[in-house]
Structure formats: structure tokens, C-alpha cells
Image (cartoon, rainbow, N blue to C red):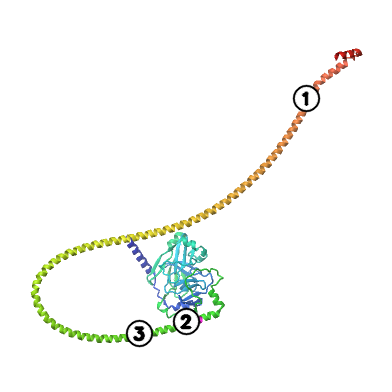
Amino acid sequence: MKKLLLGISLFSMLLVVNIGQRSHAQDVTVSFQMFYDNLAPYGEWVYDPDYGYVWVPNEEGDFRPYGSRGYWAMTNYGNAWMSDDPWGWAVYHYGRWTYDPYYGWVWIPGYEWAPAWVSWRYGNGYCGWAPLGPSVSITMGYNCPESWWVFVQPTYMYRRDCFNYWRGPSYNRTYIRQTTVINNYYVDNSTRVRYNYGPRREQVERITRQPVQVYNLSHHSRPGAPVIAGNRLNVYRPRVDRGTRDNARPQQVIQAPRQIGKPQAATNTDRNRRPQFRQDIRQNPEMRQQQVERGRQDQQRDNQRQQQVERGRQDQQRDNQQRQQQMDRGRQEQQQRDNQQRQQQINRGRQEQQQRDNQQRQQQIDRGRQEQQQRDNQQRQQQMDRGRQEQQQRDNQQRQQQMERGRQEQQQRDYQRQQQVDRDRQQQQRNVEMQRQQQVDRDRQQQQRNVEMQRQQQMERGRQEQQQRDNQQRQQMERAQQQQRNAEMQRQQQVERDRQQQQRNMDIQRQQQQQRQPQMDRGRQQQQSQPPQQAPRQNDRGGRGRDR
């Protein structure tokens, strides 16, 4: 573990040294008045009781710092925001931003230059950034309003129109849950400024599978937009003299109609809806003039107060000098008196000391011989005792040091173990949250698929039922046609059977008639061949009677 900590420390030192070697000294130093004069044509300087002099840009309602009219560029100093605005060299690389519903976005000046004063988030295919608020340290946790964030896919991050790929503030909460904070902090050794580097080139290239252009920053001699020349990026980044802020003032200052207060959510995203402050200034020029006059009066009062403070400081310095001179004279006189008294006491003491020394020297010589022997014996015994005691003390100290080192190492191991447990717990919470979100997304997608499948099944069942109805109607029609054909065939068969039966009957009758024809012919012939007989009448009666 010690070797690991030592290796991490050496790597951090080498990284800081490397950044320091890449940094070029900001050889241009300007006064704080540079901000007031250079930004005045592009906005309004407002005096707020909490933040002092702040700048409100003359922009529409959809303006957003680190979003409108600009893009990201990977440089040897990290991710730098390249603004097309003539005032972007100041507001995106110095100071902080805040938002107020009445004023819109407000810039608070600062001293330190950085590629961009933003906080970064990265993960799950998205990269996000948000401007740092007032008095926010780069090392502390940052909880700005969710609407301040801008999220895009890494593929579009270095495009000049990257802001167009942001889906809007309504999606920010989802992206914040799916991403983690990037803490790539670096220190510029030439200025001792610490800032957030942002996502590394390797991270972006791993996602996009495309090379990322890296530019080398160099100095530009004039304020304005950055200029790209090959692989060099020329930017204006002077060093700001901290001692000039108290004496610097904007030429025209508006006394704040309303106090800005704490940062709030950026609610206005409509281009045609200007902040209320700009509408009031444009619709009521007299109010602007009154506010400017109030600002000028406040500035005069501040100047008078500063002059009074300066005069009081000078009077205080004179009084201090006079008191110091009086104290120096009194100290010198006291030292002279003390020196005289000390010299007299020294002379008297020297004489008395000589007498006492002579008497004591003889006594001491006598006692010295006796005491010397005793002291020699006692010293030898004491040396032996001290040797044993010192040895015991050294042994006890060594044991105590070993125990102390063991406790420290155990505490360090416990602390590292606790840190690892905390990191594991945080990672587990992030994983659980991510799994919950993924499960919600999967459930939503599964529900959509189920609804789509049910709709398809209903449509399929409808088509099948329609097809069944059509088949049934077709079968009914075919059965009806078959029945008609069967009935027709039966009718034809019946007609044929009737005709055949009639033919058979006719044939039978014809055969019977043919069979009876010879008999009839014979009977007719016999009848013709026999003469007619007339029987007597009586016999006929008698015969009929007998027959009866």
C-alpha cells in the first residue's frame, strides 16, 4: 500500500510538472479596468450589493453561456471553449456566471484564466457541462440548477454547432442520473491556477472511434475571438493585476433595480422573449438614466469614502510614526539608565565576588578532595544506574514506536478499507440506480412491444376472422351451388329414370302386345274359320239353369 501511494504521488508530481512545462508564462498584465472598458459596448454594468459590479450581456432570451455561438476544442491545456463573440475572451475564461429571472444570465468578473470555468459530467454515451456559479471552488461539490446543464453525445462535442444537438433542459434530469462527475483537476504552475480539464481525448476517441484534433495554445496580442492557424490556437489570455480592482470603475453603472441573490433555474429559452431587465431598459430610457445617475452618485460616494479612508490611513500612519519615535527615544533613554546601573552593579559585584571567591576557593579545595572521591563513587554508581535506565528507556521507546507505527499502519489500513467500502457502496448505489433506470426502460420498451404485439395480434385475428367469414361465405356459396348442381343432377337423373322407366314400360307393353298378337291372330283366324252356331232357346235356358 505504501508503494502504491508513493507511485500515485510521484505520478501526480510528474503530471503537474508536465503541465507546468507546457504552460507559457502570461507575459501580458492588464488592469481590472480592461474588463469594464472592453465589455461596456456589449452589455450593461450593474452594481449589486452582494456581487459588486456585474455584467449583463445584450442577448436574447435563448442565450446560454458555454452554449450559444461557440464550440469546444481539445488543447494542450484541456477542453477550451472557443466563442465567436468579441467579448468571449473575458466572460468564458475569467470569473463566474449566475442566472436571475429578471436579469437573465449575469457574469461576475474574476482574476484567474482557465480554458473554461465549468463542471463536467460523462457516461452512458453523453457528455455534459454547466457554468460554475459565484464563489464556487473547483474542488468542492457542485450542485447547480439542473437547467444549467447541456448534454450532447461525444460524437457532436467538437462540432461548431454542438449546441444544436442538445435536446433541452427537460431531459437533463435523466442525463444527470446516467452520468458521473469528471474530476480531472490540473494545476498551471506558471499561474498556480487549478481548473477542471474535462473529458480526456482517449475517452472521446474510445466512444466516437474517430481521432480528436489537439491544438497548442499560444498568445494573441489583442482581445477578440480565437484564431486557428494549423495546429495552433491563438487566444488572448492576459494576467489580471489583483491590486487594480479597488481603483477600477465602469464609466456607466446602473444601480441594480432588484437584488440578484442566489443562482436560480434558467427558465427562459425563448429567443423572442427578452429578459425583463432589458425590456425595462429599452422601454424606459429615463429609468436607465436615473439608474446610471444613481450609479454615478454611488461611485462618487465610494470615491469620497475611499479618499476619506485614504486620509484616515495617512493620519494613522503619521500618528504611528510619532508614537514610534517617542517610544524609540524613551527606549534609548531607558537603555542608557539601565546600562549605567548595570555597570555599577557589575563593579560592586565583581569586588564582592572576588572576596567570596577567595574564601570559597580555599573551602572548596578542602571539600573538593573529599567530595571528589564521593562524587567519583556516586558518579560511577549513577552512570551504571543511568545506563540501565537509559537502556530500559530506549527499549521502551522502541517498543512504543513500534506499537505506534503498528497503530498508524492499522488506522491507515482501516481508513483505506473504509474508503474502499464507501467507494464500493457508492458504485453499488450507482449500479442499482442504473439497473433500475435500465429496468424501467426495458419495461417501457417491453410494454410498447406488448402493446404493438397485441395490436398486431388483434389485426391478425381480425384478418383471420375476416378470412374465416369469407371462407364460410365461399363454402356456403359452394355448398349452395353444389346443392343446386346435385338437385339438378337428381332432377336430370329422375327425368332420365322416368324416361327409362317409361321406355321400359313401353317396351314391356310392346313385348306384351307382341306376345298377345299371335294369340289374337290365331283367335281371329279360328273365329273366322268356324261357322256361327245357333242353339235352341230352351236349351239355352236349360243350360243357363244348369249352369246356375
Tag 3 residue: 317
Classify 10 Å Cα crowding around label 3: few (below 14), some (14-19), many (20 and above): few
Label 1 or label 2, whichever comes before in sequence order? 2
Image quadrant occupied by the N terminus: bottom left
Give the labeled residue for mark 2.
298
- Eye-nearest disc, 1 or 3: 3
Q: Which residue is mark 1?
A: 508
Amino acid tagged 2: Asp
Q: Tell me the SS state at disc 3.
A: helix
Locate residue 397: give its quadrant. bottom left
Badge 1 marks a residue whose secondary structure is helix
Q: Residue at x 45, y 83 (%)?
A: 301
Query: Looking at this view, is 44 or 536 the one in front?
Result: 536
Above or below 310: residue 486: above
Q: Residues within 10 Å of mark 1 (few under 14, many from 20)?
A: few
Residue 288 visible within the image:
yes
Whether residue 209 is visible to the viewer of this picture, yes or no, is no
| Quadrant of the rendered image containing residue 316 | bottom left
Of 227 and 115, which appears nearest the observer? 115
Disc 2 versus disc 3: distance between alpha carbons?
28 Å
Residue 473 locus on image (x, y percent): 67, 44
Magenta span dominant secondary structure: helix
N-term-proximal mark, 1 vs 3:
3
